[in-house]
Image (cartoon, grey):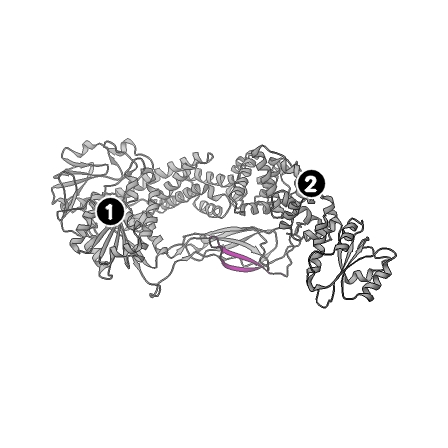
């Protein structure tokens, strides 16, 4: 310790304010080995460089044998007002025969030996073996930068274990001196060294500071590990498998006993969970890689495949747990097994556990497949309605859900293929084949057979179904009706927004807008293509078709472009406007206000789905484009309400579409020659021919409303396509299937916050269902309940849950709970969350403890519930952190 350090510490003492009631300060400097006698002599001659607080004189006395009486008389009689430094070449603990022992009782003690000065500089107490530990690790504390880093992570060392923990923390990279953080940091160091080909660097540091043996002891005492310090494989397997052992039945880990220290299982689990909870992505990736390596070395995937899903359900240590569960469910569902309830439970449980997001698309595919299986079970007797209007109503009420489930499956499938897991690829393909067969050969086949059987005569006679609103009457019947109750109406026309996508959009608008949202449907115009559907939504009396280019005219006016459609709108009202969604989104807010200022009706044309589906290079992305469309349309509705001051907004489509993931087989196509020689236009899902055209292959559509009977429409039955050059894709429209003809109309009626009955959207909440508020073991379950389904104004939410003590210190691992269940069945909205209390703490039974529930994204406290902890014995973590 240098002279500057000692003098500075002494001067700091004398610069401090005097204790209350004191008139001067006496500091007794003990230096048993006489290491600083020369420093004192120099200081006694020169004094301090800076004046001391209060301006008092400072005297310097050397109390040595033969001068004790004189020293005592000076302090007690001759000078009772000056401050003094009394130097003694003596130990502070040796009181026998000490003439100045009474002075030592009220004076301040200052020890200037190396270890005492070091303890003072570090803020460490001279207790609990601190001095001995510092002496043992002098090599570590020989550098000021290491001392500074030690103080930063261990500001108040009170024991030898604190000294060792702080030293380990500095060597491992200034981590927290907690068991879980130290073990994690060491494993990450080993992994980094292995990746760089620099094995042994950390161990060399520990060896250099004389701390390798202490670290080996630390690992053995905290985790039960007795293997080699330099083996990443052995240490990571020990920690991870030991943690696994307390999350699964004993039978699952039978045969791995050599890698597991059962008494340390819960401690290792806390280490792993703390690692999982760290926000650093690099640390998360290291843990994932270590888990993968241990899975491979221990052949865990094969082991997990041999046990029932219930044995693995709550364990979240290894990523392959998710993959094993997903694979089992996909293979079972692909074989027709009824595991719907089990699959729901697995998906909901795993959603709250680690590694889920890495394979969430597979669980999304399972969830969608279960939806399809349940729909099939509910309609196992088939579709046998007797009227077209009944079929239409059934599709709008219920049947559309099969289309939605198939879309959700295909979206999940594409995500899985993009980031494929080798172990899941085969089972996913088997499930996809089952899904396609169910959707195409059962649902599309039987539903549309029922639809054609009920509607065919009406189509031939009139071209539409009685009792169902027509797309051609949209402006007169719907828009004008809305105008009667509002100053302005904004109509957003989204190309190919089919009914089931519209239902999902309506659910979102219900949550994101203030007011009322409802969904209806109109009967699309045949052929169900853009040119006819867009024209049908505009005001008109007569619709005709251009002979040369098949362009659609309204009362003689063209309708192909946005400007042409605006001109048609302005026949009804000169101030009406039309604009593309792209242009509207690029406008400034004031420009949007100016656009709508005098308009009664504004049409906004949006094209996200059809633009992707019509291009064979991108048609496989059409279902993903549906999600993009929902995002766009939600934004456009808000613009219409907020910037264009429209309290009535409608979202409508020109037509729907059919999509199948696999290309149709040869027998599911009709030769174009079947249309005949009088064809005016042939596409994959329709044909237009001159005059009447009797046919057993096609459904004949009356075209009187379009061409006064000069043409007849032909539509393939069911979902089959007409062969044509360049055709044969996955995405088609133009035909008469419910998916193509059922056009959604979403009504959004915006209301002010003060309007009567207005309800703002709220997150789905969780309540504590467990009535027993006593915790009797380090690992325990808590039952939660989602009071309301996440539908309508209630939207899904994610929560973080953790137990804390009365000071707010976290005492358990952090757990996640997702409140997203939509079922009306209250029992199905229950869930169970497993917690592990941190070891190394005492849990007095008289103290209160609290379960905190925080919003995962805002971290705001939602609620807290009081618990009592009554555990007889908790293994200690001697670091005390």
Q: Secondary structure at mark 1?
A: loop
Circle 1 residues within 10 Å: few <14, some 14–19, many ≥20: many
- Residue 500, how many percent across, how many down? 31, 48
Q: Nearer the viewer, residue 674 or 145?
A: 145
Residue 533 highlighted magenta (yes or no): no
Task: Kindly identify which residue carries mark 1.
Answer: 654
Location of residue 771 by image quarter? bottom right
Q: Nearer the viewer, residue 535 or 198?
A: 198
Label 2 vs label 1, nearer the camera: 2
Residues at discs 2 and 1 in contact (Cβ within 8 Å): no
Query: Outermost residue toward the bottom?
Result: 21
785 relative position to 237: left or right: left
Q: Residue at x 28, y 41 (%)?
A: 611
530 relative position to 81: left or right: left
Residue 855 highlighted magenta (yes or no): yes
Location of residue 726 by image quarter? top left
- Residue 652, how many percent across, how many down? 26, 50
| Residue 794 shows in the view | yes
252 relative position to 73: left or right: left
Task: Kindly identify which residue carries mark 2.
Answer: 209
Above or below for 177 versus 671: below
From mark 2 to mark 1, how far is it between C-alphas?
A: 77 Å
Q: Magenta region's main secondary structure?
A: strand
Magenta span: 847-866
Q: Nearer the viewer, residue 110 or 306?
A: 110
Q: Nearer the viewer, residue 228 or 310?
A: 228
- Which mark sits nearer the N-terminus, 2 or 1? 2
Circle 2 residues within 10 Å: few <14, some 14–19, many ≥20: some
Q: Secondary structure at mark 2?
A: loop
């Amino acid at each position: 310790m240098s002279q500057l350090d000692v003098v500075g510490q002494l001067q700091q003492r004398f610069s401090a304010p005097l204790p209350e009631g004191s008139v001067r300060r006496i500091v007794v400097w003990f230096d048993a080995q006489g290491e600083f006698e020369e420093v004192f002599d120099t200081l006694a001659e020169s004094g301090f460089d800076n004046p001391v607080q209060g301006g008092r004189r400072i005297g310097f006395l050397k109390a040595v044998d033969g001068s004790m009486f004189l020293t005592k008389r000076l302090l007690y009689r001759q000078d009772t007002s000056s401050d003094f430094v009394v130097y003694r070449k003596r130990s502070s603990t040796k009181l026998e025969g000490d003439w100045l022992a009474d002075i030592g009782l009220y004076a301040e003690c200052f020890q200037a030996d190396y270890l005492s000065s070091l303890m003072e500089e570090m803020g460490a107490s001279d207790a609990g073996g601190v001095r001995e530990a510092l002496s043992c690790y002098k090599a570590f504390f020989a550098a000021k930068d290491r001392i500074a880093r030690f103080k930063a992570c261990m500001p108040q060392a009170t024991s030898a274990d604190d000294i060792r923990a702080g030293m380990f923390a500095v060597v491992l990279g200034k981590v927290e001196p907690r068991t879980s953080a130290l073990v994690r940091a060491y494993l990450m160091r080993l992994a980094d060294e292995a990746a760089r080909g620099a094995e042994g660097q950390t161990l060399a540091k520990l060896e250099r500071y004389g701390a390798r043996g202490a670290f080996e002891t630390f690992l053995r005492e905290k985790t039960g590990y007795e293997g080699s310090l330099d083996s990443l494989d052995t240490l990571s397997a020990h920690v991870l498998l030991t943690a696994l052992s307390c999350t699964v039945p004993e039978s699952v880990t039978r045969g791995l006993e050599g890698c597991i220290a059962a008494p340390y299982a819960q401690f290792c689990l806390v280490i792993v969970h703390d690692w999982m909870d760290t926000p650093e992505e690099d640390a998360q990736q290291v843990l994932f890689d270590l888990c993968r390596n241990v899975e491979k070395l221990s052949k865990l995937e094969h082991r997990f495949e041999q046990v029932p899903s219930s044995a693995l359900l709550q364990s979240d240590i290894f990523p392959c747990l998710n993959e094993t569960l997903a694979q089992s469910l996909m293979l079972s569902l692909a074989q027709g097994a009824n595991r719907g309830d089990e699959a729901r439970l697995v998906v909901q449980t795993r959603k709250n556990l680690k590694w889920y997001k890495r394979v969430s698309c597979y669980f999304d595919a399972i969830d969608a497949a279960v939806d399809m299986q349940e729909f099939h079970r509910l309609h196992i007797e088939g579709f046998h309605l007797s009227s077209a209007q009944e079929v239409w109503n059934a599709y709008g009420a219920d049947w559309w859900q099969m289309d939605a489930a198939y879309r959700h499956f295909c979206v999940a499938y594409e995500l899985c293929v993009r980031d494929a897991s080798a172990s899941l690829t085969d089972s996913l393909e088997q499930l996809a084949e089952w899904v396609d067969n169910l959707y195409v050969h059962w649902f599309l086949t039987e539903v549309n057979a029922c639809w054609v059987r009920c509607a065919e005569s009406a189509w031939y006679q009139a071209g539409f179904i009685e009792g169902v609103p027509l797309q051609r009457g949209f402006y007169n019947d719907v828009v004008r009706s809305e105008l009667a109750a509002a100053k302005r109406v904004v109509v957003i026309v989204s190309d190919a927004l089919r009914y089931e996508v519209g239902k999902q959009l309506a659910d979102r608008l219900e949550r994101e807008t203030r007011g009322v949202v409802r969904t209806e449907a109109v009967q699309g115009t045949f052929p169900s293509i853009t040119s006819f559907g867009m024209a049908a939504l505009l005001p008109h009396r007569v619709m005709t078709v251009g002979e040369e280019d098949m362009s659609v005219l309204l009362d003689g006016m063209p309708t192909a472009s946005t400007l042409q459609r605006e001109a048609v709108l302005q026949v009804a009202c000169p101030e009406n406007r039309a604009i593309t969604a792209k242009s509207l989104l690029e406008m400034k807010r004031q420009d949007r206000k100016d656009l709508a200022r005098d308009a009664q009706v504004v049409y906004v044309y949006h094209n996200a789905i059809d633009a992707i589906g019509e291009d064979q290079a991108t048609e496989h992305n059409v279902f993903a484009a549906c999600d993009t469309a929902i995002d766009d349309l939600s934004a456009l509705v808000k613009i219409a309400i907020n910037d264009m001051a429209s309290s009535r907004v409608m979202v409508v489509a020109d037509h729907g579409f059919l999509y199948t993931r696999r290309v149709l087989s040869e027998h599911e196509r009709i030769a174009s020659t079947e249309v005949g020689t009088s064809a005016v236009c042939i596409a994959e899902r329709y044909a237009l021919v001159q005059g009447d055209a009797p046919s057993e292959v096609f459904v004949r559509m009356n075209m009187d409303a379009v061409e006064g009977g000069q043409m007849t429409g032909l539509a393939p039955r069911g979902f089959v396509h007409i062969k044509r050059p360049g055709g044969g894709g996955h995405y088609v429209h133009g035909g008469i299937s419910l998916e193509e003809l059922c056009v959604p109309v979403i009504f959004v009626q915006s209301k002010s916050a003060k309007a009567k009955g207005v309800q703002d959207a709220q997150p789905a909440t969780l309540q504590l269902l467990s009535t027993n508020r006593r915790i009797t073991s380090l690992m325990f379950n808590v039952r939660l309940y989602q009071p309301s389904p996440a539908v309508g104004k209630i939207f899904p939410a994610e929560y973080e849950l953790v137990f804390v003590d009365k000071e707010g210190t976290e005492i358990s691992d952090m757990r996640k709970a997702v409140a997203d269940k939509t079922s009306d069945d209250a029992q199905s909205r229950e869930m169970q969350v497993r917690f592990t209390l941190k070891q190394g703490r005492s849990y007095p039974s008289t103290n209160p403890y609290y379960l905190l529930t925080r919003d995962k994204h805002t971290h705001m406290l939602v609620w807290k519930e009081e618990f009592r902890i009554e555990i007889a014995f908790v293994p200690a973590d001697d670091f005390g952190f």
